[in-house]
Image (cartoon, rainbow, N blue to C red):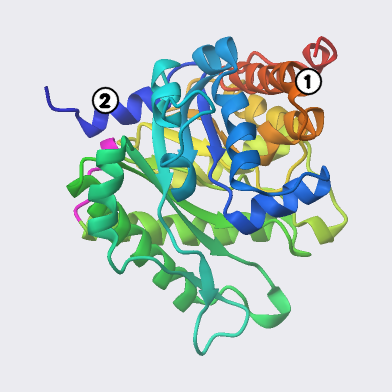
Amino acid sequence: MTERLEDIALAMVADGKGILAADESSGTIKKRFDAIKVESTEENRRDYRELMFRAGDAMKNHISGVILYDETIRQKAADGTPLVDIIKAAGAVPGIKVDAGAKPLAGFPGDTVTEGLDGLRERLAEYYKLGARFAKWRAVIDINEEENVPSATAIDANCHALARYAALCQEAGIVPIVEPEVLMDGAHDIDTCYEVTKVTLLQLFSELYAADVNLAGTILKPNMVIPGKKSGTKASPEQVAEMTLKVFRETVPVAVPGIAFLSGGQSDEEATANLNAMNAAGPLPWKLTFSYGRALQAAPQKAWAGKKDNVTAAQKAFAHRARMNGLAAQGKWSPDLEKQG
């Protein structure tokens, strides 16, 4: 039986489920572990991720897929079971991060372009054999109005790379998650975020069409439209929902089955509240769900703190965040439910 890209993509945005981003690079996971005073060894990284993948009901009911890092997709659990098999047994789709990170774009100070296309066809073939059925590639679009960042060149280069990556994924039988992240780190207002997001998404879909990418077998992982962290302003979930949905209606073809948001540095509850507000806004042409890393993991990491005795507490913390976001993906979350956690 051949696995259709469209079916895998639909499974990834199933009702009330979202994607766990557990693909932190070695450098990023070290920072997270430093914060909880845990040494970043291969064994500790495995134990931590295994506790999430084994969080029974949370995985079965609220997680549709897991993005893995190269090390993790090859690892076995403490009992010798491949981690990929544990994920599959929970009914989730294993996925893999394949980009090589954002590097400075020559000639354009402040802009970056994501690398990793060289040898990607061969890597995807290997990841498919290891069990991956979707992949992720993140493009980073920073906003710095004083420095004229982002440049049109940076947006074009990143969208072109995303399209080439997506085409290679589909050739390999792998669903591409295309992630053009407009960062929330700057001092810009929500209108500027909206404008840059709109330009980026229009360019992205133009490139995907040009590369003959099957949109029905593709998932979009975008930022929400929010003001920059340094702007000193906060937007309400209703305003975030209104601006984000407006930009999608203007740019995202209905052929795309689902949009799985990144949390992008929002707090756990903010990311949940904003997702909920969008789904509460009425029927939409795409499934809107989550593809969170830190917003799903901050609480379980803290609860675990590297101690075997804390595994159950960490799984409970993970289950709570997964459930909250699962409800938000259906527009059924409310702040009162947080207290039950």
Per the model, the C-alpha gap separating discs 2 and 1 is 39 Å
Is 210 situated above or below 87? below
Amino acid tagged 1 = Asp
Does the segment drawn in magenta span residue 216?
yes
Left or right: where does residue 256 sit relative to residue 87?
left
Q: Nearer the viewer, mark 2 or mark 1?
A: 1
> Toward the viewer: 119 or 326?
119
Which residue is painted at 36% across and 23% down in the image? 11
Which residue is painted at 20% across and 46% down in the image? 172
Amino acid tagged 2 = Asp
Give neighbour class at mark 1: few <14, some 14-19, many 20+ (Cα, 10 Å): few
Counting from the top left corner in percent of width and height, residue 28 is at 65, 54
Left or right: where does residue 246 sit relative to residue 228?
left
Dot placed on the residue nearer the N-terminal end, 2 or 1:
2
Q: Which mark is residue 309?
A: 1
Left or right: where does residue 88 sit relative to residue 67?
left
